Image (cartoon, rainbow, N blue to C red):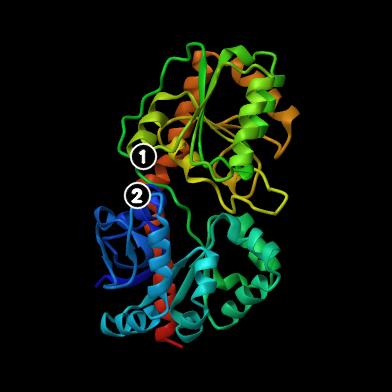
């Protein structure tokens, strides 16, 4: 008998939350997934049933009309959601992102012991910084029996520091099978480094550019950026840095489709993501999915010791790890990468595959997700 799970999320669109779709698809043998969202794309609803009359069919980027329509119909959605939970005998309510959970506080308080809240990125520190009541609301949920899902021990310890009891926190690592050939390219020059991430301060594109400018071997690299522009001022600053330091080997690209993203990962030498904590305490929270995708495809990563990243990226084995927000240390790592031999690069690539093989073979994400759901259900049965 499959576990019936209702997922709450703002955007279920192919351009935004592909990793959540992968999580649901890969756990569909054990779970029957249902969807409650603000915006969705019909072509994305594979192995998922959406609540009727809840959510706006939308393209991306989301139009002003769709946003306005969502606000208008949102007032009456709780009635439809409660009916759906009762009629379909939903066993688990899974809220993705802290801000989504906070908007559904009334529903969570009503069904607390059935609820799981997954926290990603800005949920941990940015939201509590923005609104001082957030930690108290998280703690209140926990005291009512709500569970929290995080990606690693750093995130778990952070929630524990807020007063949330350890037994109410589960770890679910997100690592997925990506259907593309695992190919180790020849390490011919230039060495191609790519960062595929939203242009935003916590992703550290500015640190990479400044480190490249300081590197003794900057001309041995080709740097490719792709992503959505979250902050035009920050994006413009990146271009100014590249111009001021005459970084002719840097290319700025737009957001990629999932197919384009996977194809690019297959053609580069190294993935970069110099994650850092911003001035407003925005963080990765866990470990970016792009880092894990790269490792599963045999591509080493150049990253930082930020949040849960060191649990999967190991310096000198499958990665080069610089100190967070440290231009000098990042430049030193680039110099090390510039001097790589083909045999050393192949060793790093093989280590990437080795470090992720067991997790992929065991379908770790789906396994941990199902275990978290079963834990909640069993505790309710014997309460």
Position in image of residue 229 (x %, y %): 52, 41
Query: Residue at point 49% right, 76% down?
Result: 104
Determine whether 211 is above or below 170 in the image.
Answer: above
Determine whether 22 is above or below 162 in the image.
Answer: above
- Residue 321: which disc? none
Label 2: state its secondary structure. loop
| 347 on left or right of 242 | left
Question: Foreground residue, 232 or 102?
Answer: 232
Position in image of residue 172 (x %, y %): 48, 58
| 324 on left or right of 295 | right
**Is tag 1's residue or tag 2's residue first in the polypeptide sequence?**
2
Mark 1 Cα-neighbour bin, 10 Å: few <14, some 14–19, many ≥20: few
Say which quadrant the N terminus sits in: bottom left
Mark 2 Cα-neighbour bin, 10 Å: few <14, some 14–19, many ≥20: many
Q: CA distance from mark 1 to mark 2?
A: 8 Å
Residue 280 found in image quarter: bottom right
Residue that mark 2 sits on: 14
Position in image of residue 316 (x %, y %): 61, 29
Residue that mark 1 sits on: 257
Label 1: state its secondary structure. loop
Determine whether 258 is above or below 219 in the image.
Answer: below
| 90 on left or right of 238 | left
Q: Are marks 1 and 2 in contact (CB under 8 Å)?
A: yes
Residue 157 visible in the snapshot = no
């Amino acid at each position: 008998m499959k576990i019936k799970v209702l997922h709450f999320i703002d955007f279920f669109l192919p351009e935004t939350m592909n990793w959540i779709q992968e999580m649901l698809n890969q756990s569909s043998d054990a779970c029957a997934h249902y969807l409650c969202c603000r915006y969705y794309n019909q072509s994305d609803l594979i192995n998922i049933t959406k609540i009727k009359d809840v959510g706006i069919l939308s393209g991306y980027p989301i139009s002003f009309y769709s946003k306005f329509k969502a606000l208008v119909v949102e007032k009456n959605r709780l009635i439809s959601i409660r009916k759906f939970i009762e009629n379909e005998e939903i066993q688990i309510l899974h809220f993705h992102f802290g801000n989504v959970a906070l908007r559904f506080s009334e529903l969570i308080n009503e069904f607390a012991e059935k609820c799981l809240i997954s926290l990603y990125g800005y949920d941990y520190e940015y939201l509590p910084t923005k609104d001082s009541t957030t930690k108290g609301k998280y703690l209140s949920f926990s005291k009512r029996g709500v569970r929290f899902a995080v990606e690693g021990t750093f995130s778990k310890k952070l929630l524990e520091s807020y007063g949330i009891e350890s037994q109410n926190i589960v770890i679910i690592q997100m690592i997925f099978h990506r259907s593309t050939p695992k190919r180790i390219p020849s390490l011919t020059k230039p060495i191609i480094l790519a960062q595929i991430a939203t242009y935003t301060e916590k992703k550290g594109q500015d640190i990479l550019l400044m480190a490249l400018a300081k590197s003794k071997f900057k001309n041995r690299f080709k740097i490719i950026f792709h992503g959505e522009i979250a902050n035009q001022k920050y994006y413009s600053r990146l271009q100014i840095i590249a111009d001021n330091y005459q970084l002719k080997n840097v290319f700025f690209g737009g957001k990629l489709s999932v197919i384009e993203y996977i194809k690019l990962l297959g053609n580069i030498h190294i993935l970069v993501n110099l994650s850092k904590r911003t001035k407003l305490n925005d963080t990765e929270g866990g470990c970016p999915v792009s880092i894990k995708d790269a490792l599963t495809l045999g591509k080493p990563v150049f990253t930082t010791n930020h949040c849960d990243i060191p649990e999967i990226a190991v310096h000198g084995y499958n990665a080069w790890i610089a100190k967070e927000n440290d231009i000098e240390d990042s430049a030193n790592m680039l110099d090390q990468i510039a001097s790589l031999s083909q045999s050393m690069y192949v060793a790093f690539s093989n280590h990437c595959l080795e470090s992720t093989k067991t997790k992929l073979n065991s379908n770790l994400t789906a396994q941990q997700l199902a275990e978290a759901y079963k834990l909640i259900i069993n505790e309710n049965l014997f309460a």
